């Protein structure tokens, strides 16, 4: 009989066991809550509504209409035009027709104010891969990138996990609507230097995620000057460029370069994707557009680890080269997003919630700081937990986006149930109403301590008037009322939580 | 006080005129000096060279940049990759794609025998897609045509439907009683990212994997930092791996203080086409347990076996005996067995839950495109078509190989006797002028430039013996085989006449 010897467990790499994938943060925890209990109009109305995942579904009908009318885009058999040529060409350069179509589409989004060369486009499987690939190319492990806060929580994973590069935040605050200032950039640069990190580049998202606003021309000029002064790269993540409410409001870094005659262009790289503008994240289509020949060559070779399938390229090439379709789509998508935004803002205003003035993207950057107990990160997370578990809305807290001011939340404008006439459905309105009531009422987290406080104050006043009830002072009465109100609020909270009281909560089935 | 008083004096018109004017001047001078010194290291006077104002994307002002503030730096990784590739594998591929052979349109073009594609059954695929691909992009969700099924975010490691279809396809292709569990699969956008992902999961920067030579010219080092240590196999053993060679390589690498994390096999082997026997696989598993390392088995050609020898997957061996399953990982892909060009689907199949969990998170950087997933699900579920395809494919590869090998034998070139994969491993040792890599590359170059045939030389596959060439015959039509032979004879014949 063999003696059982304890075999040493075979080990995994540091990358595999590290927590830099960031999936323990509240951003992803909300998604998990949605996955476990998703809302459905008819079958699960007490589920969690997903307002934390950026999917643009407002314009699906346009895509479907195109595909129905143009079956040659999806036809893939004998006799289909260009089948053989497209079929047998499959290296990492990508289909020429697709790159041409992407370049034209990007030009159309910018209203023809910038030109794009198809040979500078490198294809990757999604903007996630594009951002990571650029980081591998521009920085060595241990170097740093500057990113203005608040930023997309996925950057912590995409830019740091396998690359070993650090992120140094450029702190922006609400005093100037979170615009990037030269002082903030310089401060971030100095802080990186003090940590002995070499800064290799600055990465901006324009239009911004999560702010939902474009960067102004003057700020872009300042950012480019800063990059030139410090001799570093500038990566502009423009994946929401087609989701601005009007074409004139979006200024791309490409336009700035064009006005400067392409001086200093070799430090600028643009990331684009069809996941947000066309609402096709499942297709996994991302691009890197670089003005630097060396970066283009390297990125193309490294893109062999993250390629787009030829069927998808062929389908999208047909779709995007149809000028009529693409122009109509861009225009309609913008109008619908703008309309949605106005509705959401109105609804939130009625609920007493202020938002940052936005002009792009799929988000609202809401200010819920009046609802916080204390202006701290902990109370922001506590409020987020209440909204997720009681109100059943998955919105993202600002701390997961590294916002320096607590109380800001990111919410989607386009949820995953949209009615045929694209009006804010009555359900959403109901939910907003209830959420307003809920947030005001159901703040049970500090209730017990408040009750204690008010009771002590009442007792103190009692002692002061030495229990002479005839000498009922106004203070005494007020303090007594406060205790009673707080106790009844707490009681109501506990009872609604256990479901015994009908408060019109989402636990009800209609 | 000294400072303030004279200034005060000046202001009040009383004395201290001299000091009152000198001191501010001095202060002002020092201020200028300080500002100048602060500005100069970071920002010298802007270059006055004019940059060209063309709207085109030509390289601008790079010279002025160099003069003024130093070159713009990219990472050291990128610098090494950006160098022009001097590997014969890539040079040959580029030349062939620039001037491709076509029997009618371009009969003097370069015949591509270096790219492993199986075009023999392309007509079957074409026929199937034209008959069956109606509404494949817009699926039927609840009765209405809708794109939302594939447009939205999918699980990054592939949909369960596709995994189940792949499991079914693999069992059918391997033709034995092995069943594959869909929940142990992770799908990636091609086999290259699958292997890279596994390297990221199993090894740290600076670690190494043992690889039996000759092997497919892959380089996993770029982003993972993982080295590939060759374990040389020789023709006298028919290029079959031996445990003693593995052991030797392992010990030698350990002496260099590089940690070995695993063995990277391909079974069937690329390029030689050997199959690993059951005994060999068991010996490898024992070796891995002894040294506490992983085994990655690249089984991408498992469906291209057309001989009498049976293919044994490592999954079967691990399942049957009492081996530690946690160290075995299999990589598979569809592009060789099912020639759907450009379909990027690779698969990691592992028994180790931790590896699967890590790999799933890593697939968000290389996910399979959703329309491709839908297309493949419908194709792989058409059992009748798949069975017919597999049988026809095997027959056609066998016939083509026999034709090709016979043609080479007429020229006096022998090939190893392997009945799997899409290649011949041709022995041209007696045709190279000097015994060495230089001689081999001379012949390769002559074949490419004069004969206009792109073969892959053994040195690109890290073969220790010079003179071996890899020829992929499945890109040819039957009629083109004699053209290839003629061209080789021209080059070889001209050599023997003057050699």
Image (cartoon, rainbow, N blue to C red):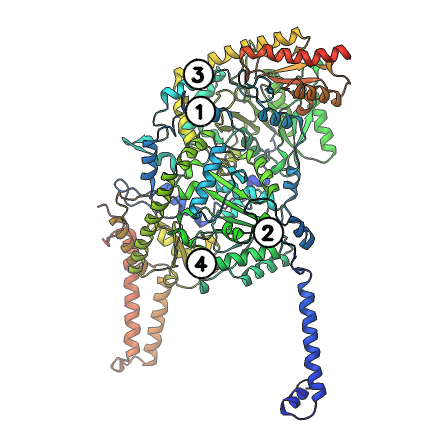
Chain letter for mark 2: A
Label 1 sits on a secondary structure element that is helix
Disc 4 marks which residue? Answer: A378
- Horizontal side of A395 relative to A430 (left or right) equals right
Asked whether residue B155 appears in the rendered view, the answer is no
- Horizontal side of A125 relative to B49 (left or right) equals left
Chain letter for mark 4: A
Q: Respond whether the residues carrying marks 4 and 2 are from the same subunit.
A: yes
Which tag is nearer the camera, tag 4 or tag 3? 3
Residue pictured at 35% horizontal, 31% vertical: A70
**Residue A435, image x, y percentages:** 30, 55
Which tag is nearer the camera, tag 3 or tag 1? 1
Q: Which mark is residue A264?
A: 2
Structural distance between the alpha carbons of marks 1 and 4: 58 Å
Question: Compared to B468, does B69 lie above or below?
Answer: below
Q: Respond whether the residues carrying marks 3 and 1 are from the same subunit.
A: no
Residue pictured at 29% horizontal, 44% vertical: A418
Residue pictured at 45% horizontal, 16% vertical: B123
Earlier residue among tags 4 and 2: 2
- Tell which of A21 and B109 is nearer to you: B109
Disc 3 marks which residue? Answer: B124
Chain letter for mark 1: A
**Residue B254, image x, y percentages:** 72, 32
Label 3 sits on a secondary structure element that is helix
Disc 1 marks which residue? Answer: A83
Structural distance between the alpha carbons of marks 4 and 3: 62 Å
């Amino acid at each position: 009989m063999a003696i059982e010897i304890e075999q040493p467990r075979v080990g995994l790499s540091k990358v595999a066991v590290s927590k830099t994938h960031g999936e323990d943060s509240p951003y992803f925890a909300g998604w998990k809550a949605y996955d476990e209990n998703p809302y459905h109009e008819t079958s699960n109305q007490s589920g969690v509504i997903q307002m934390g995942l950026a999917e643009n579904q407002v314009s699906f009908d346009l895509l479907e209409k195109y595909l129905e009318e143009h079956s040659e885009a999806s036809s893939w058999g004998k006799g289909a035009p260009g089948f053989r040529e497209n079929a047998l060409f499959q290296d990492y350069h990508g289909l020429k027709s697709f790159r041409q179509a992407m370049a034209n589409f990007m030009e159309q989004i910018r209203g023809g104010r910038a030109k794009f060369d198809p040979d500078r486009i490198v294809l990757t499987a999604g903007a996630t891969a594009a951002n990571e690939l650029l980081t591998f190319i521009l920085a060595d492990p241990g170097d740093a990138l500057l990113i203005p806060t608040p930023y997309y929580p996925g950057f912590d994973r995409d830019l740091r996990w396998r690359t070993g590069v650090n992120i140094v935040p450029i702190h922006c605050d609400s005093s100037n609507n979170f615009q990037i200032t030269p002082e903030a950039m310089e401060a971030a640069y100095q802080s990186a230097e003090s940590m002995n990190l070499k800064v290799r580049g600055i990465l901006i998202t324009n239009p911004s995620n999560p702010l939902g606003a474009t960067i102004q021309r003057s700020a872009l000029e300042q950012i480019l000057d800063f990059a030139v002064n410090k001799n570093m790269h500038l990566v502009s993540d423009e994946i929401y460029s087609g989701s601005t409410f009007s074409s004139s409001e979006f200024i791309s870094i490409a336009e700035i370069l064009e006005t400067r005659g392409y001086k200093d262009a070799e430090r600028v790289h643009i990331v684009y994707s069809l996941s947000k503008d066309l609402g096709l994240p499942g297709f996994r289509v991302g691009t890197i557009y670089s003005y630097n020949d060396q970066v283009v060559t390297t990125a193309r070779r490294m893109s062999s680890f993250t390629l787009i399938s030829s069927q998808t390229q062929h389908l999208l090439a047909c779709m995007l080269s149809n000028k009529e379709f693409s122009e109509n789509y861009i225009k309609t998508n913008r109008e619908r997003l703008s309309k949605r935004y106005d509705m959401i803002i109105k609804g939130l205003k009625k609920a007493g919630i202020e938002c940052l003035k936005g002009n792009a993207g799929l988000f609202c950057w809401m200010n819920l700081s009046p609802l916080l107990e204390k202006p701290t990160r902990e109370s922001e997370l506590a409020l987020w937990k209440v909204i997720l578990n009681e109100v059943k809305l998955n919105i993202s807290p600002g701390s997961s986006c590294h916002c320096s001011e607590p109380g800001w939340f990111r919410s989607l404008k386009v949820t995953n149930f949209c009615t045929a006439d694209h009006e804010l459905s009555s359900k959403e309105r109901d939910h907003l109403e209830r959420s307003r009531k809920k947030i005001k009422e159901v703040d049970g987290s500090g209730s017990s301590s408040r009750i204690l406080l008010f009771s002590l104050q009442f007792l103190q006043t009692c002692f002061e008037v030495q229990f002479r009830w005839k000498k009922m002072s106004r203070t005494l009465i007020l303090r007594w009322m406060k205790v009673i109100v707080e106790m009844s609020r707490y009681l109501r909270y506990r009872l609604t939580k256990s479901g015994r009281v009908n408060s019109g909560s989402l636990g009800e089935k209609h | 006080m000294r400072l303030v008083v004279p200034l005060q004096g000046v202001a009040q018109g009383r004395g201290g005129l001299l000091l009152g004017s000198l001191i501010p001047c001095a202060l002002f001078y020092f201020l200028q000096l300080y500002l100048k010194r602060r500005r100069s290291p970071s920002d010298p006077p802007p270059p006055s060279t004019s940059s060209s104002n063309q709207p085109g994307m030509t390289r601008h002002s790079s010279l002025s940049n160099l003069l003024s503030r130093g070159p713009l730096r990219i990472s050291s990784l990128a610098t090494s990759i950006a160098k022009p590739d001097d590997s014969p594998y890539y040079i040959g591929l580029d030349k062939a794609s620039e001037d491709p052979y076509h029997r009618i349109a371009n009969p003097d073009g370069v015949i591509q025998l270096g790219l492993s594609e199986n075009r023999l059954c392309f007509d079957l695929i074409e026929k199937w897609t034209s008959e069956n691909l109606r509404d494949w992009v817009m699926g039927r969700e609840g009765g209405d045509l809708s794109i939302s099924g594939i447009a939205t975010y999918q699980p990054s490691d592939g949909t369960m439907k596709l995994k189940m279809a792949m499991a079914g396809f693999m069992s059918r292709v391997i033709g034995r009683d092995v069943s594959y569990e869909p929940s142990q699969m992770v799908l990636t956008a091609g086999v290259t990212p699958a292997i890279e992902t596994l390297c990221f999961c199993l090894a740290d920067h600076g670690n190494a994997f043992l690889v039996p030579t000759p092997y497919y010219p892959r380089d996993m080092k770029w982003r993972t930092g993982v080295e590939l240590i060759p374990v040389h196999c020789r023709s006298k053993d028919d290029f079959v791996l031996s445990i003693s060679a593995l052991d030797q390589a392992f010990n030698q690498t350990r002496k260099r203080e590089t940690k070995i994390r695993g063995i990277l096999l391909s079974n069937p082997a690329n390029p030689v086409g050997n199959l690993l026997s059951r005994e060999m696989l068991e010996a490898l598993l024992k070796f891995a347990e002894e040294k506490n390392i992983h085994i990655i088995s690249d089984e991408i050609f498992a469906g291209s076996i057309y001989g009498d020898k049976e293919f044994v997957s490592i999954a079967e061996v691990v399942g049957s005996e009492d081996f530690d399953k946690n160290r075995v990982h299999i990589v598979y892909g569809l592009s060789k067995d099912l020639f759907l060009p450009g379909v990027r689907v690779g698969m990691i199949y592992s028994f180790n839950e931790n590896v699967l969990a890590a790999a799933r998170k890593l697939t968000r950087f290389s996910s399979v495109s959703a329309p491709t997933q839908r297309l493949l699900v419908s194709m792989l579920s058409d059992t009748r078509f798949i069975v017919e395809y597999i049988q026809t494919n095997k027959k056609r590869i066998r016939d083509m190989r026999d034709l090709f090998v016979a043609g080479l034998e007429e020229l006096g070139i022998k090939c190893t006797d392997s009945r799997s994969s899409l290649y011949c491993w041709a022995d041209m040792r007696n045709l190279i002028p000097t015994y060495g890599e230089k001689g081999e590359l001379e012949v390769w170059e002559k074949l490419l430039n004069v004969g206009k045939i792109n073969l892959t030389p053994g040195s690109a596959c890290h073969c220790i013996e010079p003179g071996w060439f890899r020829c992929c015959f499945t890109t040819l039509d039957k009629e083109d085989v004699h053209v290839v032979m003629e061209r080789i004879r021209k080059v070889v014949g001209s050599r023997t006449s003057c050699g």
